[in-house]
Image (spheres, grey):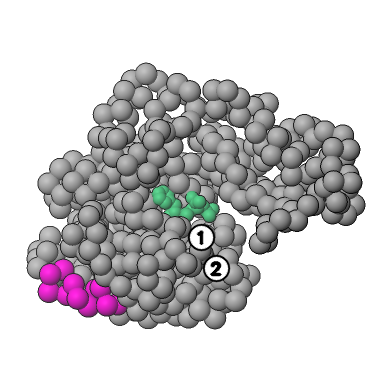
Amino acid sequence: MKNIQSYVQEHKDRFLNELIELLKIPSISADSAYKDDVLKTAEAVKNQLEKAGCDSVEICQTKGYPIVFGEKIIDKNLPTVLVYGHYDVQPPDPLNLWNSPPFEPVIKETELHPEGAIFARGACDDKGQMYMHVKAMEFMTSTNQLPCNVKFMIEGEEEVGSESLTDFVKENREKLKNDVILISDTGMIAKDVPSITTGLRGLSYVEVEVTGPNRDLHSGLYGGAVANPINVLTKMIASLHDENNHITIPGFYDKVEELSTEERAEMAKAPFSLENYKKALDINAVYGEAGYSTNERNSIRPTLDVNGIWGGYIGEGAKTVIASKAYAKISMRLVPNQDWKEITQLFKTHFESIAPDGVTVKVNPHHGGQGYVTPIDSVGYQAASKAYADTFGKTPIPQRSGGSIPIVSLFEQELKSKTILMGFGLDSDAIHSPNEHFGVWNYLKGIETIPLFYKYFTELHN
Ligand code: BES
Ligand code: MN
Ligand code: MN
């Protein structure tokens, strides 16, 4: 492709400034106080897609937040790439741990990003990565090098479960028809170790509630004589893992696909330093399921984690009290073949069954989704691999990720197309955490690599 690198060099300040403007809008989908900002972000994305050369861009209303859909169809006989991304972001809490306000983007150097990184909520997940596609589109249309048809579908509810998008996909199969889906909403191993994500975990998210006595009690007068919901809840949670850190829910592992020795050996070839991993997290040891490596534990194995737990008195000083209720939020990361609805049911049945007398237990399922794996011999993967080889000077490594983008398995089911996950973030970019950032180098590298994917995909497609 002609002059992509010089185009990026020439326009990089504007590319950064436009992203910074987008990052200033707090599009927090989880918090209804930010509704207007979420809607404003959809408008901003629409405007930028128009400027980047889409022929038609619409804001498609749903029962939740709108989906921005844009397209440029140059020839019905050419293949069509569907780009998916999300313009919503996670809540920035806890605010006091940010070194600069989450919606006032700043560029600062870090050890891993000597060229600078943009610090803001959504910088990497997913405004920055989504916007690489908008700028790649601008390059291709403005230099007359768009080799195929393009559709964009950018949603505003990814961080809260993509409920509206699920209906939208089912109702718009024809409109969304494509030959491959392209997403940048994952990461890569390192700046000098490019990788393409070939798998995502599924998810089941539940909230549990343990109720004991009908009111909070004096912990002296009643302590020892009635079940304390917090004691009970923590004991129940502790029993969900055995001494080998296997999950004890009956049937939980029944459908888990075990990788062959060869597949595991292949995975183990990816460069990984346990020392650096521990150092980056300030931990003196890793922890997890016996018999599996760190990289296996966080990608090909299912997990169960408490995400939040509360109850009783947590204010200043001490209050001697036995709470009437205790709560926890629990996520289970699932692997392909595990059905998230089935796992949710298994959890519910088991958790209710282990409740001791003296308390009642309620399990409230939230959202979830299926995992995903994609083969590396598809045209899409091969095109992505060639694109990275050109811009990184190395063939990328296939890597299964531990994160979830539940809508990807629905795309396969409803649209019958494969998704290629070209992520340019690093694990250390702190997505969902305070001080989220995205390397300037990564951002520009993404913009350079994406047009090559279009080129190779069009060439290889028949
Ligand atoms: N972009 C992430 C998922 C991700 C990040 C996958 C890095 C692989 C590598 C996405 O926005 C996300 O946060 N997904 C949620 C699930 C969703 C249902 C809330 C997740 O993984 O917790
Ligand atoms: Mn994301
Ligand atoms: Mn996210």
Asked if ligand 1 lies within 8 A of label 1, the reply is yes
Outermost top residue:
261
In this view of the protein, which residue sits in the foreground, 411 or 26? 26
Q: Which residues are magenta?
A: 8-18
In this view of the protein, which residue sits in the foreground, 118 or 337? 118
- The x, y position of residue 321, in whole percent, is 80, 52
In this view of the protein, which residue sits in the foreground, 192 or 104? 104
The residue that mark 2 highlights is 29
Q: Amino acid at mark 1?
A: Glu
User: Which mark's residue is nearer the viewer, 1 or 2?
Assistant: 2
Question: Circles 1 and 2: CB distance less than 8 Å?
Answer: yes
Upstream in the sequence, badge 1 or badge 2?
2
Residue 82 painted magenta: no
Residue 266 seen in this snapshot: yes
Label 1 – label 2 distance at C-alpha: 8 Å
Residue drawn at the location 63% of the way across and 70% of the way down? 63
- The x, y position of residue 311, in whole percent, is 72, 53
- The x, y position of residue 153, in whole percent, is 43, 65
> From the viewer's perspective, is residue 65 above or below residue 432?
below
Q: Amino acid at mark 2?
A: Ser
Q: In the rendered view, does 232 fall on the left or right side of 389? A: right
Q: Secondary structure at mark 1?
A: helix
Q: What is the crowding at mark 1: few (fewer than 14 residues within 10 Å), some, or many (at least 20)?
A: many
Q: Main secondary structure of the magenta part?
A: helix
The residue that mark 1 highlights is 158
Q: Secondary structure at mark 2?
A: loop
Residue drawn at the location 57% of the way across and 34% of the way down? 338
Q: In the rendered view, does 290 fall on the left or right side of 10? A: right
Residue drawn at the location 30% of the way across and 28% of the way down? 268
